[in-house]
Amino acid sequence: MEVVYKIATTKKIINSLREKKQSVGLVPTMGALHKGHLSLLDKSVLENDYSIVTIFVNPTQFDKQEDLDNYPNTLKEDLEKLKNTGCDLVFVPNAQEMYQDNISADVFSFDGLEKEMEGKHRAGHFNGVGTIVKRFFEITQPTNAYFGEKDFQQLQIIKKMTAKENLPINIIGCPIYRERDGLAMSSRNMRLSPIHRKAGPFIYETLLAAKEKFASESIVSIHNFVSQAFEKHPLFEMEYFEIADETTLKTATEKKKDTNYRGFIAVYAENIRLIDNISLS
Ligand code: AMP
């Protein structure tokens, strides 16, 4: 496994792979790796001749400086975890390498996908995501790129960007990997206090209960159920819960035939923001 810090070195390696007609799988991450990240990598290793993991905490996708400053940095442990996984290259650029002296995001239109949920609550977030993923695509020219359904809106946005820009890349969504108790794995979980970590499964349990109700109850009633559950909870503050069409991500107010729905939630545990989602169909 090679660890590379420079764009030029990565491009050279990619060029030689392309000459040999090898397929390349890309797994972009912000590090603080956990089993969720590694599940994406496992799939890439199975499906490609060569697998690349990128580790880069992208400043332009953070709307709060405090969140960026507190984002865990565990590079040494990350590289250790990647050994013996089948990962061929870890690309670890710094901000200067990715942005030169201009740390700013390009502006994208994702046909409205960026205006829903996370887009409403994290100003500019998806412009930052689009900017960095597009650059990683340009540098690594992957055959297949792997993204988690944990960030379902991000996954749909990357699919949209790839289609709109006609990029010859397959975007592959991977299921949410959970802790044994149901909490969706996240790099942010390591910052939870023991009491919040212990209470963590409540988020998924509430989503599961919403899923069960979806077959028989109205969307309004499920909304009320989830909101009330979090109002009563002493440790979590709900930022939003939305039931949305999986493809358009538009908020649903009533159930339509032949439409797949998902429940999306964002919750604060003190100052740590957690997101999760569940298929309702
Ligand atoms: P991040 O490092 O949080 O930016 O995540 C990098 C990639 O890993 C993204 O495509 C995420 O959606 C994915 N990911 C993060 N957590 C999980 C999880 N629990 N299960 C599956 N994929 C995940």
Image: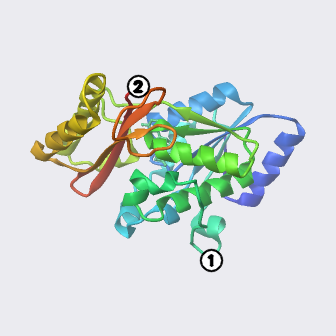
Q: Position of residue 83 (x, y in %)?
A: 58, 36
Of residues 157 and 50, the one drawn nearer to the viewer in this rendering:
157
The answer to whether 109 is drawn above or below residue 2 in the figure is: below
| Side (left or right) of 96 relative to 191 | right
Q: Position of residue 253 (x, y in %)?
A: 33, 41
Disc 2 element: loop
| Side (left or right) of 116 relative to 219 | right
Residue 171, can we see it? yes
Amino acid bearing label 2: Ser
Disc 1 element: loop
- Disc marking residue 281: 2
Which residue appears at 54% of the width and 56% of the height?
129
Residue 85, can we see it? no
Of residues 151 and 211, the one drawn nearer to the viewer in this rendering:
211
Of residues 77 and 60, the one drawn nearer to the viewer in this rendering:
60
Q: How is the image coloured?
A: rainbow
- Disc marking residue 277: none
Which residue appears at 73% of the width and 54% of the height?
139
**How far is disc 2 from disc 1 in space, using C-alphas?**
46 Å
Q: Position of residue 44 (x, y in %)?
A: 63, 32
* Label 2: how many Cα within 10 Å (few below 14, some 14–19, many 20+): few
Q: Earlier in the sequence, mark 2 or mark 1?
A: 1
Find the residue positioned furthest to the right.
19
Amino acid bearing label 1: Asp
Which residue appears at 35% of the width and 49% of the height?
188
Of residues 279 and 146, the one drawn nearer to the viewer in this rendering:
279
| Side (left or right) of 266 relative to 100 | left
Quarter that holds the N terminus? top right
* Label 1: how many Cα within 10 Å (few below 14, some 14–19, many 20+): few
Q: Is the CB of mark 1 within 8 Å of ligand 1?
A: no
Badge nearest the viewer, 2 or 1: 2
Residue linked to disc 1: 101
